[in-house]
């Protein structure tokens, strides 16, 4: 196995930060020096996982594996290699094992697009959210401020017992202009555009690549 870890380029750094704002998880195995990133999604989002896997060439470890989740749910995940650069991100985004948002967070359109593909949702034309319920209020306010620096206005919206970010109606067109160039085809539904790939075949009948099938056995 090749344990060489290449330096992250700026594109990869932006993607990883977007993953951390969303569903990604960084951890350090006890006794090890550096951290690694785990990418894990429902099997329905296989195309999205494979996009992340391709983007992280040079730091990824092994091929994505299919695994069983709760009930009949299936997931697909992969890990990166341990990296000093990912360790630095761990220091910034975790406090006592809890994911937080660093006060100096800076967003760009790519990071925002990955974050939206992970955690964005559009309920109606004027109801667009980032599901940030995993973060405390302080971290969510930092996120709102970071969005403002991109010219996007948003507020915290109560979702049952937690809060999430809701974009003001006037900012939604600019949001989609910023992120659309980076949204992959299978995730276009999140901005109200159907994916040709997902409408052509049922997600539960996806034909997996042979290497992924073998790796899950």
Image: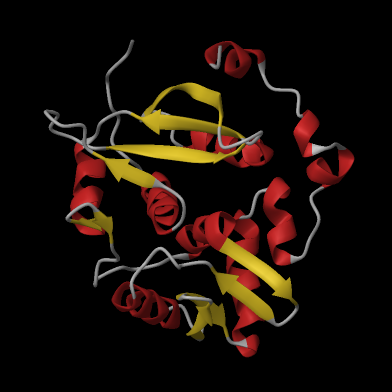
Q: State the image coordinates of residue 83 (x, y, percent, origin top left).
A: 24, 34
Q: Furthest-right residue in view?
A: 200
Residue 38, percent across and down? 39, 37
Q: Residue at x 50, y 59 (%)?
A: 115
Q: How many marks?
A: 0
**Coloring scheme of the render?**
secondary structure
Give the quadrant of residue 205.
top right
Q: In the picture, residue 1 is in which quadrant? A: top left
Which quadrant of the view contains residue 141? bottom left
150 w.r.t. 66: above or below? below
**Is 56 positioned to the left or the right of 169 in the image?**
left
| Residue 43, x across and y down, in percent | 64, 35
In the image, residue 129 sits, relative to residue 71, either above or below, namely below
Q: Is residue 113 visible?
A: no
> Would you say residue 120 is visible in this rendering?
yes
Q: Is residue 30 left or right of residue 183?
A: left
Between residues 55 and 217, which one lies in front from this camera angle? Answer: 217
Q: Quadrant of the C terminus?
A: top right
């Amino acid at each position: 196995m090749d344990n060489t870890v290449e330096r992250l380029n700026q594109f990869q750094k932006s993607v990883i930060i977007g993953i951390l704002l969303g569903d990604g998880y960084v951890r350090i195995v006890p006794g090890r020096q550096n951290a690694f990133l785990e990418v894990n999604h429902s099997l329905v989002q296989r195309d999205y996982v494979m996009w992340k896997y391709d983007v992280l060439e040079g730091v990824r470890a092994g091929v994505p594996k299919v695994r069983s989740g709760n009930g009949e749910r299936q997931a697909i995940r992969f890990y990166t290699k341990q990296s000093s650069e990912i360790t630095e991100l761990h220091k910034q985004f975790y406090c006592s094992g809890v994911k937080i948002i660093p006060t100096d967070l800076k967003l760009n359109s790519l990071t925002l697009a990955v974050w939206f593909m992970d955690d964005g949702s559009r309920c109606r034309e004027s109801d667009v959210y980032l599901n940030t319920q995993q973060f405390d209020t302080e971290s969510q306010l930092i996120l709102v401020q970071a969005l403002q620096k991109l010219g996007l206005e948003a507020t915290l919206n109560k979702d049952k017992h937690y809060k999430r970010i809701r974009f003001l109606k006037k900012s939604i067109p600019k949001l989609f202009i910023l992120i659309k160039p980076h949204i992959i085809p299978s995730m276009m539904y999140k901005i109200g555009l159907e994916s040709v790939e997902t409408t052509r075949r049922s997600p539960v009948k996806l034909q997996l690549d042979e290497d992924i099938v073998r790796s899950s056995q």
